[in-house]
Amino acid sequence: MIQQLLEVRGVRHVALLDPAGSIVTSAGSGADISVVQIGRAVIGSLQAALGQSEWQDLLLDMEGGPILLTPHGNQVLLTAFDQVDSLGRVRFAVRRLLG
């Protein structure tokens, strides 16, 4: 299923992680999945501060390239890609896949 995202120009790595941070499935290579736990902590803090219960996605612009974290039930989809300029294309593909 998530391997389809590797067909999107610029996408290097995709991983679906469970609530404990373990990989459920992945494709490609080159991303540090430890950012998912950090991203979840940031999101949790923001949700508490803003009184929000839902989130859409979180973009981390890392030294090795941007990483998009997207919720999928209680799991998180990590999508690592080449440049922030590709964000629109990547978001569209992720939403189409998860929708």
Image (cartoon, rainbow, N blue to C red):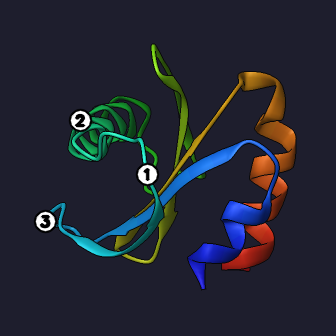
CB of mark 2 within 8 Å of CB of mark 3? Answer: no
Q: What secondary structure is found at the residue carrying circle 1?
A: loop
In the picture, the disc for residue 29 is 1
Question: Is the residue marked by circle 2 packed among few (<14), some (14-19), or many (20+) residues within 10 Å?
Answer: few
Q: On the image, numbered disc 2 is attached to which residue?
A: 38
Query: Picture quarter containing residue 88?
Result: top right
Mark before the other along the chain sequence, 1 or 2: 1
| Residue drawn at x 33%, y 38% as measured from the top left | 39
Q: What secondary structure is found at the residue carrying circle 2?
A: helix
Q: Tell me where residue 10 appears, x and y as whole percent.
A: 74, 42
- Taking 10 as reference, is 85 above or below it? above
> Quadrant where the N terminus lies?
bottom right
Instruction: Name the one closer to the observer, 70 or 54.
Output: 70
Disc 2 and disc 3: Cα gap in Å? 12 Å
Disc 1 and disc 2: Cα gap in Å? 20 Å
Mark before the other along the chain sequence, 2 or 3: 3
> Quadrant where the C terminus lies?
bottom right
Q: Tell me where residue 76 appears, x and y as whole percent.
A: 40, 62
Mark before the other along the chain sequence, 3 or 1: 3
CB of mark 1 within 8 Å of CB of mark 2? Answer: no
**Amino acid of disc 1:** Ser
43 left or right of 98? left
Q: On the image, numbered disc 3 is attached to which residue?
A: 20
84 left or right of 45? right
Instruction: Name the one closer to the observer, 59 or 54.
Output: 59
